[in-house]
Structure formats: structure tokens, C-alpha cells
Amino acid sequence: MTKVNLRKYMLSGVDLTYLGFPVELTHYPGCAFIVYQEQHPRYHQPYSRVNNQNNNNSGNNKYINNSLQHTFNVNAREFVPSQVSSDKLKTADSDSDSTSSSSSSLSDWSDETCESLGSSPTTWNNINQTQTVEHSCVRCFENFLINRETNEYITKDKCIYHWGKLRNNYYNPSDSKWNCCNGEENSSGCTEGNMHVWTGITQGCNGPLDGYVRTKPSRVISWDDNYGVYALDCEMCFTKNGLEVVKVSVVDMKKNIVYDTLVKPNSEIIDYNTRFSGITKSMLKNTKKTLKDVQKDLLTFISAETILIGHGLENDLKALKILHSMIIDTCVVFPHFLGYPFRSSLKTLARTVLKKQIQLSEHDSIEDAKIVVDLLLARVKHDNTKSLHM
């Protein structure tokens, strides 16, 4: 399977930006910028509440590919942050003029773009005017304070939350239940965490962010234009700096394991997120491999021309701190029937498209990566069959 017959499923540079992937600005090589919007609704709204435009996108064909509604003005003047610390301004290396990051460079960012996303360039001027910053807990949605410089917690409250999703009753919209405990919408959380948690990314424009590496052009020219296609999935835990990777798995298109390792987070772990990551304290006890080690390992077989596939892959690349532009995401290949920004979970797609049950207890990054391969192959087979009958 080559890049040629997968190209139509790949995300454009604008798609990568809009979906929250880490991207590289032309003026700041080696630094990442992430545009974060509230893309993941807290729960699925009843079908009757959705705009008719989204209703028109629904149907019996689960392979319908809705187009993203972009808000970027490609004719706007270039956006350059007004203040960036000198240590973030890194000079390009010897191959910085290559095309490896051309499709993810954002030469069309503008002040208007940032304002429309809930942030403005003035944020850059005021970033050091206070020692504390307020975040919203991604589990219980309560606000908490941390030290801006050290990310040490100032608020020490317990986190009381529902770990499941709030499901609406389509016949009675007021009767909403949490699927983790069958509690009412306004009921007290069924789970207690020691502290609040956040993802490490805030609403609006984030950057410049250092510690990122970008994939390099292949040193060997492939005669068939095939530089590899790999499915990647990560497990993450919550640290004081947000989400950090603790396990990385990569499989090829034959579902052979190419890479699989545990990773020691750089920061203090707040919550191992075991219910979803499957990672426990004992598993990481003797782990020595760091994020930098993993980056070095991955870049030995993932080049700028390699196609990476995944489900919600922007989260994995943010955790890995890797800049890459050849992306296929099954969240887009199989859009939710309510339309963007709703997303079908990998578990749901495995059940509805592949008739497979996964994640029955905890997430397994190898299993998830293999399911992503199966989903993409199913989509390709469906499209090829459909084209033969047209």
C-alpha cells in the first residue's frame, strides 16, 4: 500500500491546524504551535437538538466523509507573536529548507484567526504578569490554580468526578445518565482523585513550545514512492505538566509490532489514568527510557515521507512532541453521524464497522493500533468496491 492510493485520506496542513495537531511556523523552526478549541463535546446531544445542516449529513452509509468547516482566512496577513523568549528562537538545522514540514507550516495565521479561537496576540505580552494561572479540570470541570513558572499546584482540592460519559435519552432529553454509575446529570461524581488534572494545553493559541522534534526527509529514494505506513497509539498519564506519554506502540500495515515500549514521564505523576491507560505505578517502576529516547528511536524508521495513521492522532503527537505532516486520522475517515466536532470512539468504530469488541477492561495501545489498521483497510476496500460499481 503506497502513498499514492492513500493520499485522498490524508489531512491537509489546514486540517492539521484546525484539529489541534502540533505544527511548525516558518519563523520558528523547531518550535511547535497548537491551536486548541473545545472540539470534544462533554456528551452527545440528542439528535433533535442538532442543527439541520448536520442532520443532512447523517444516513445509512457509515463511510460518509463530512468536510471540516474551517475558520481560517488564507488571505489574512501573517501572524507573528509579539514577544518570544530568545531561547525559543532556534536556528534551522542544515536541512531546514526541506519540504518535510511545508504542509504543516502556518504562513496564513492572522490576528483575526487567534481572536476567533478565543485568544489574541496580546496574550503573549501579558503572559508573565502574574505568577498563577487558572485551569479547568478535564474530569470534574472545576477551576484550580497552579504556579505559572513551575506548574506546582496551588489548589490541593480532591477531584470528584464521573469517569464515564453523559448519555442522553433521545426520547426524554431531560433524563440524562452517566454511563459509569447510571447517576443523574447533576449527581455527585462517583470517583475521587487526589488532585485536579489538565492536559497541558489551554484554549486558543499555544506556543512557541520547545522540546519538539520534526521528522527528517528520507536519505533513500523509494522506487515505488513507499516510505512506510505505520499505525501509532500512545497511552498517557496525568502529570503536573499535563498529559505525558507512558507507553508507545507502532504496528505496520500487516499488524506486525514495529515498536513497543514504556516511557518514564519527565514530570511528577498526578494520576496514572489506569482505567484508560492500563498503566500502573509498578509497571513504570524500573522504566528508564525517556521521551527523548523514544523520539530518537521513532525517527530512525519514521521519515518525513512516512504516513502515520491513528485515532485522534493529534493527542499522540502532542504527547510524543513530534512534528509530522503525513497524517491519516480515522476520526476524519469515519466522521460522527452528528458531524464535526463530534467524534466516534475507537471502541464504537470497532464494534460498528469491524464487528469487534475492544477495550473491554483497559486500553491496550497495541490492540488499538491494530484496530486503526483494520479500519483504514476497511475504508479503502469499501471505496474501491464502490468505485467499481459506478
Image (tube, rainbow, N blue to C red):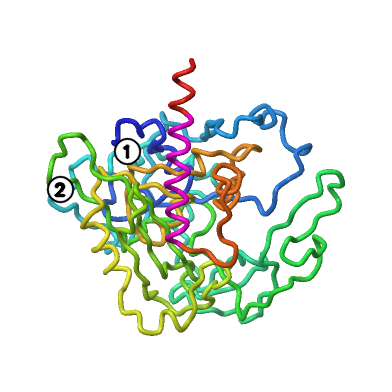
Residue drawn at x 41%, y 28% is 75
Q: Secondary structure at mark 2?
A: loop
Q: Nearer the viewer, residue 54 or 117?
A: 54
State whether residue 121 appears in this view.
Answer: no
Report which quarter residue 161 is drawn in.
bottom right
**Which mark sits nearer the N-terminus, 2 or 1?**
2
Q: Badge 1: few (under 14), some or many (20 or more) residues near its Cα, within 10 Å?
A: some
Rendered residue at 17%/46% (across/down): 218
Alpha carbon distance from label 2 to label 1: 16 Å
| Amino acid type indicated by mark 2 | Asp
> Residue at coordinates 19% horizontally, 52% vertically from top-left?
92
**In the rendered structure, which segment of residues is drawn in magenta?**
365-382
Residue 344 image point, x, y percent = 59, 46
Label 1 sits on what residue type?
Answer: Ser
Indicate left or right for 195 with 71 as reference: right
Is the residue marked by circle 2 packed among few (<14), some (14-19), or many (20+) residues within 10 Å? few
Give the vertical position of 342 relative to 73 (above or below).
Answer: below
Please tell me whether mark 1 sits on a helix, a strand or a loop: helix
Q: Which mark is residue 103?
A: 1
Q: Quadrant of residue 17?
A: top left
Q: Quick check: 167 left or right of 307?
A: right
Vertical position of residue 349 compared to residue 203: above or below: above
The N terminus: image quadrant: top left
In x, y percent, where is residue 356? 56, 50
> In this figure, which residue is indicated by the disc labeled 2?
95
User: What secondary structure is the magenta-colored segment mainly?
Assistant: helix
Residue 380's spot in the image, x, y percent? 43, 33
Q: Indicate the position of residue 173 as horizontal and vertical percent values.
A: 84, 47
Q: Nearer the viewer, residue 86 or 242?
A: 242
